[in-house]
Image: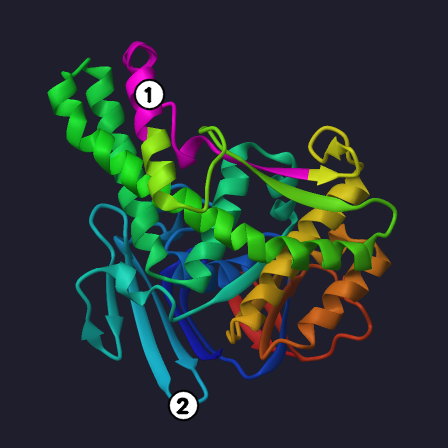
Amino acid sequence: MLITSLNLTNYRSYTSLDLTLGPGVSIFVGKNGEGKTNIAEAILYLTFLNSHRANGNTPLIKLGNQSAYIRAKVKYPEREILVELEINSDKANRAKVNQNQVRSQKEIFGIVQTIYFSPEDLDIVRGDPGERRRFIDQLLTLRSPRIAGVISDYERAVRQRNSLLKTRASIDALGPWDKQVAELGGELITLRMLALDELKPIFNQVYKGISETKPADIVYKSSIENPSLNQSENNEKIMERLISNRGAELERGLTLTGPHRDDLLLILGDHLVKGYASHGESWSIALSLKLATYNLLKSDGLSPILILDDVFSELDEERRERLAEIAKTAEQTIITVAVENDLPKSITGTRYLVRSGLVSKL
């Protein structure tokens, strides 16, 4: 797949932007703060329906406006789809597909698929467990858009249950939400573990190609004992913990068991990466996770857009070249860079200058 045109209206620094894009590599050059990452972010918003840089929609809307708009023509081998998204700060977003209004923005999940590299990828390795949960859940969503609904429903059930716990609600009131948390949580744990089983050998191979000094591994750490690929077993284990922890949960007003408490343990040699690995080793792990994700999607028969956002300045020459090799295999690659000299010499493509919210072809 590739985006053939991208239009932004009142989005971040852009009052109006019309871009025509082609296959291969498109390189956006501009100093920090000029708006090049806003282009990458808009494409990502169409993929995940949220921003990786902001909580909520208000920061995405140009000051003085109520809504921002992202429109993209997405070309597949056999068809072309026009997807339009209206982003609102004080009401639900609205979406259109081929100019037809859809009931929910969630219906556009899967139309645009992207793999994204940025300096923030180091947070997957060094950040809190939420960053690693987000990583595996985004992989699930990219491979099967319907899973976004499972994740959303689970998060809603946990929020509702937490609200009831804070009011010290009765067992009868908590019962239906216990059931939802257990069933949706058990499904999500199983989905994550199945995906991890497929990702791990690819990750191990990619990391070995980057650094042969120590073997790398990923282990799923769950809030239940011995999580299983059997969803029913996970459901039962979550329910048992919800019941046994009832007193502690009422005391704290929090749901203490479920996939929202889980983590991915990244291991290098005999140690956890977090806290032990060097900066270079941490970057190698982060890069390997993203490259493994890209390779897994390719093995699924998908052709995600590759976005490399200000990442080359963070990498040494060897890692830059590794990423450049992948960039040349993608049907479409979007690169942002502040300094052109940070780009590997092997990368060529259409170049754009981004300055003060204006984009011009070089």
Magenta residues, start to end: 239-266
From the viewer's perspective, is 316 left or right of 355? Answer: right
At mark 1, the secondary structure is: loop
Work out how far the residue at label 2 is from the one at label 1, CA to CA, in angstroms: 48 Å
The number of numbered badges drawn on the structure is 2
The image quarter in which residue 260 lies: top left
Q: Nearer the viewer, residue 39 or 96?
A: 96
Badge 1, how many Cα within 10 Å: few under 14, some, many 20+? some
**Colouring method of the image:** rainbow
Badge 2, how many Cα within 10 Å: few under 14, some, many 20+? few
The amino acid type found where label 2 is placed reads Glu
Give the quarter of the figure containing the C terminus: bottom right
Which residue is rendered at x = 78% and y = 39% of the image? 279
The amino acid type found where label 1 is placed reads Leu
Question: Does 238 sit above or below residue 314?
Answer: above
> Where residue 277 is drawn, which disc sits there?
none
From the viewer's perspective, is 298 left or right of 285? Answer: left
Which residue is rendered at x = 40% and y = 62% of the image? 144
Question: Is residue 289 a member of the stretch shown in magenta?
Answer: no
> Where residue 78 is drawn, which disc sits there?
2
Of label 2 and label 1, which has the lower sequence position? 2
